[in-house]
Amino acid sequence: MTYRIHRQVEADTVVFVLSGALDADHCERLVELVAAESGRRVRLDLAEVTMVDRAGVQCLAHLQAEGVALVNCPGYVRRWIAEEERL
């Protein structure tokens, strides 16, 4: 599956623009990249994400709980994250 992470800086926030399919393998790298930005605000732009599996949703829920903002998040992913948080 194709997946890409593009990093950009906007003022005091690091934005990771994600595109393609987000699965367990890609989440590992994403978590590493977010951790490397300690002390900075981080935002994930999901506008170009085409598919997210359960591991991807759990990863996004974890990052969101850690203070990472999710923008342009598809509705089905937001609902799935909410369900994961209830478990």
Image (cartoon, rainbow, N blue to C red):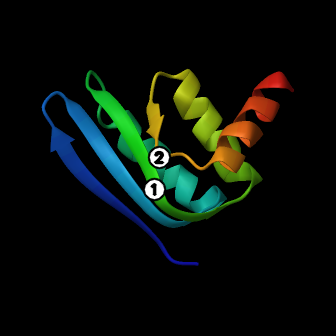
Numbered-mark total: 2
Q: Residue 81: give x, y in percent of width and height.
A: 71, 36
User: Which residue, as the protein is rendered here, is positioned at the far right?
Assistant: 87
Q: Secondary structure at mark 1?
A: strand
In percent of width and height, residue 73 lies at 54, 45
Given residues 28 and 52, the one toward you in this image is 52
**In the visual, does 63 lie left or right of 83?**
left
Residue 27 against residue 43 in the figure, above or below:
below
- Helix, strand or loop at label 2? It is loop
Residue at 41% across, 48% down = 45
- Which residue does the image show at 26% across and 52% down from the upper left? 7
- The residue that mark 1 highlights is 47
Left or right of residue 4: residue 11? left
Judging depth in this view, the residue of 79 and 66 nearest the camera is 79
| Residue type at tag 1 | Ala
User: Residue flagged by tag 2: what amino acid is it?
Assistant: Asn
Is 23 in front, or is 69? 69
Percent across and percent down for residue 61 are 63, 34
Residue, x 17% and y 27% (percent of image)? 12
Whether pointer 2 and pointer 1 mark residues with C-beta atoms closer than 8 Å, the reply is: yes
Question: How far across and how far down the image is residue 53, in percent?
Answer: 72, 58
Which residue is located at x 36 percent, y 54 percent? 17
Residue at the spot of label 2: 72
Q: Quadrant of the N terminus?
A: bottom right
Labels 2 and 1: the sequence-earlier one: 1
> Mark 1, residues whose alpha carbon is within 10 Å: few (<14), some, or many (≥20)?
some
Question: Where on the picture, by quarter, is residue 87?
Answer: top right
- Calculate the distance from the C-alpha at mark 2 to the C-alpha at mark 1: 5 Å
14 relative position to 31: left or right: left
